[in-house]
C-alpha cells in the first residue's frame, strides 16, 4: 500500500516577496510562450523561473536548468523562499467556476510526500496514461539540476468513511496560510498542518485514509516517471542514506467519494477528409451509432455544454459543414474492433471513438501520429474549426467527460487510456509549496 509522509516544504515568504499572487504560476505544461513572458515580467521571483526557465539568447539549451538551480539557491540564501520548521502536510482548497458554465465547485485535498514505487502490476501507484519522451527528459533535467519538485503529481484515493473529508473541512475552517486567486479566477487556499502539532490527529486521519488503497495518478505522469529515474540515479551513487528524500515525490492527494472532481473532455477535430470522406462518414455512421440529426449547430452546442452530463454513456456529437447529429454508440457493434485491454478500457467513450475513427474515417494510430486529428477542450472552438475549415478541419466529434470512477477502473486493470483522454481541472498552482529532496 502507498506510504505517505509529512515533509518540510519550501515556501515563498510574503514579507520578502509581497503579494503571493505575483509569484505563483500555472504548471509548466499549460504555459505557452506569451504567458511565460507575462509571468516573468510579473515579479522577479515568479515561480516560472524555476518550473519553466526560459532559453536566453546565446545560451545552450541545458543552461536554463542550471540557471533555475542558481536562482533557487539564491532565493534560499536571501530569504525569498524559506523552509518550514516542522514536517507537515498541507491542506489545499480550490474554488472555481466550471469552464463553460455558471456552476461553482470546491475541491479539497492535501500535499504530502509519496514513496515512489515502480509502475508494475501490484504496485500501490497506478497510472492511466502513456507518457512521451520529450516532456520526461525536460522534467528530468530540471529535477537533476535543482533537486526539488516544483509542482506536484496529482493522485486520487477513495475514502468511503468520509473521515478524510471531515478532517479537511475542520482544517479549512481556520484562517489559511496562503490565499491567492489565479488568472482564471480560481481561488486557492493553503494550510500548513504540522504532523506533531495540535491537529496531529487530523493529519493521521488523512494519511491513513489515503494509504489504505492504491493511488491512481490523475495528472503528472511525466513528473512521476521522472522522479523514478532520478531516484534510481541517486541510488546508483550509493550515498549511504538509509531513507533518502529522493525516494519520494510530492503529491496532491484528492479524495473521490465525498466530492465531485471536474474532468473536462477533449474534443476531436478530424482533418483532411475531403467532400467524399465527409459524405462517407455521414453515410456510414449508422454502422456503429444510432443517429439523431440536429437542426443546427446551436442545438449540438447546447447538448454538449452541460456540466451535469454524467459521461461514459457512449454519446457523441458529430458536426460537419453538411450538418450534424447526436450519436449513441451501439456497443455490440464495436465488439469486433475492441480486442485489447480489459473491460474498463473497452467501455470508455474515448476508446469507442478511436475505434469509430479507424473504421469510418480510416484514421488509425499512424494517421493520428501524422496529425490527422486536432484537439480542443472548448465545444465552441471545436465547432468553429470545422465551420472555418481551419487547417483542413472537416468534422468534429464532441465528447462527454470521462467519469473519475472509469479512470480508476482502467488504472486498476493495469491498462492505459488513449492520449488526450482526460483533463483534470483546475490545475494545482506552482509556487505555493516546493518539495526539496532533503529532510
Image (cartoon, rainbow, N blue to C red):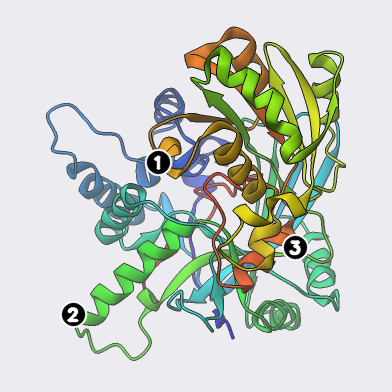
Front position in the image: 181 or 160: 160
- Provide residue 35's location: percent of width, then percent of height: 46, 27
Circle on res. 237: 2
Instruction: Decide: is 277 above or below 370.
Output: above
**Element carrying mark 2:** loop
Identify the residue at image location x=75%, y=72%.
Answer: 158
Instruction: Decide: is 70 above or below 305.
Output: below
Front position in the image: 292 or 299: 292
Q: Which residue is mark 1?
A: 366
CA–CA distance between discs 1 and 3? 30 Å
User: Quadrant of the image for the N terminus?
Assistant: bottom right
- Provide residue 134's location: percent of width, then percent of height: 31, 47
Mark 1 or 3: the one toward you:
1
CA–CA distance between discs 2 and 3? 40 Å
Mark 2 or 3: the one toward you:
3
Identify the residue at image location x=55%, y=65%.
Answer: 251
Tell me if I can see residue 244 in this picture.
yes
- Provide residue 129's location: percent of width, then percent of height: 52, 57
Q: Which residue is mark 3?
A: 405
Amino acid at each position: 500500500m502507498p506510504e505517505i509522509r509529512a515533509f518540510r516544504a519550501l515556501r515563498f515568504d510574503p514579507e520578502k516577496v509581497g503579494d503571493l499572487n505575483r509569484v505563483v504560476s500555472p504548471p509548466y505544461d499549460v504555459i505557452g510562450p506569451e504567458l511565460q513572458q507575462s509571468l516573468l515580467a510579473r515579479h522577479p521571483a515568479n515561480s516560472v523561473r524555476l518550473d519553466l526557465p526560459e532559453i536566453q539568447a546565446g545560451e545552450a539549451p541545458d543552461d536554463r536548468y542550471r540557471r533555475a538551480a542558481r536562482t533557487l539557491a539564491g532565493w534560499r540564501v536571501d530569504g525569498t523562499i524559506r523552509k518550514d520548521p516542522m514536517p507537515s502536510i498541507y491542506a489545499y482548497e480550490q474554488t472555481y467556476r466550471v469552464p463553460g458554465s455558471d456552476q461553482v465547485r470546491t475541491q479539497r485535498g492535501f500535499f504530502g510526500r509519496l514513496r515512489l514505487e515502480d509502475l508494475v502490476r501490484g504496485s500501490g501507484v497506478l497510472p492511466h496514461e502513456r507518457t512521451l519522451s520529450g516532456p520526461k527528459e525536460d522534467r528530468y533535467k530540471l529535477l537533476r539540476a535543482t533537486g526539488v519538485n516544483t509542482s506536484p503529481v496529482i493522485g486520487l484515493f477513495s475514502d468511503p468513511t468520509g473521515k478524510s473529508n471531515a478532517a479537511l473541512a475542520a482544517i479549512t475552517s481556520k484562517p489559511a496560510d496562503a490565499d491567492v486567486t489565479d488568472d482564471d479566477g480560481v481561488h486557492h487556499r493553503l494550510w500548513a498542518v504540522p504532523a506533531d502539532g495540535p491537529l496531529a490527529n487530523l493529519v493521521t486521519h488523512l494519511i491513513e485514509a489515503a494509504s489504505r488503497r492504491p493511488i491512481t495518478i490523475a495528472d503528472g505522469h511525466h513528473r512521476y516517471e521522472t522522479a523514478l529515474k532520478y531516484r534510481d540515479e541517486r541510488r546508483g551513487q550509493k550515498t549511504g542514506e538509509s531513507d533518502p528524500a529522493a525516494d519520494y515525490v510530492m503529491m496532491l492527494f484528492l479524495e473521490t467519494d465525498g466530492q465531485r472532481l471536474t474532468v473536462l473532455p477533449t474534443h476531436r477535430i478530424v482533418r483532411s477528409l475531403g467532400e467524399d470522406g465527409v459524405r462517407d462518414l455521414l453515410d456510414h455512421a449508422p454502422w456503429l451509432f444510432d443517429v439523431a440529426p440536429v437542426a443546427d449547430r446551436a442545438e449540438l452546442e447546447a447538448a454538449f455544454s452541460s456540466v451535469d452530463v454524467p459521461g461514459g454513456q457512449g454519446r457523441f456529437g458529430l458536426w460537419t459543414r453538411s450538418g450534424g447529429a447526436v450519436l449513441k454508440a451501439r456497443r455490440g457493434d464495436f465488439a469486433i474492433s475492441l480486442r485489447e485491454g480489459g473491460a474498463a478500457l473497452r467501455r470508455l467513450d474515448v476508446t469507442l471513438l478511436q475505434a469509430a475513427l479507424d473504421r469510418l474515417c480510416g484514421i488509425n494510430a499512424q494517421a493520428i501520429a501524422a496529425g490527422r486529428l486536432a484537439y480542443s477542450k472548448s465545444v465552441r472552438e471545436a465547432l468553429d474549426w470545422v465551420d472555418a475549415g481551419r487547417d483542413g478541419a472537416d468534422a468534429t466529434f464532441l465528447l462527454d467527460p470521462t467519469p473519475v470512477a472509469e479512470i480508476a477502473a482502467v488504472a486498476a486493470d493495469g491498462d492505459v487510456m488513449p492520449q488526450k483522454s482526460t483533463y483534470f481541472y483546475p490545475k494545482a498552482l506552482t509556487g505555493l509549496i516546493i518539495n526539496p529532496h532533503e529532510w
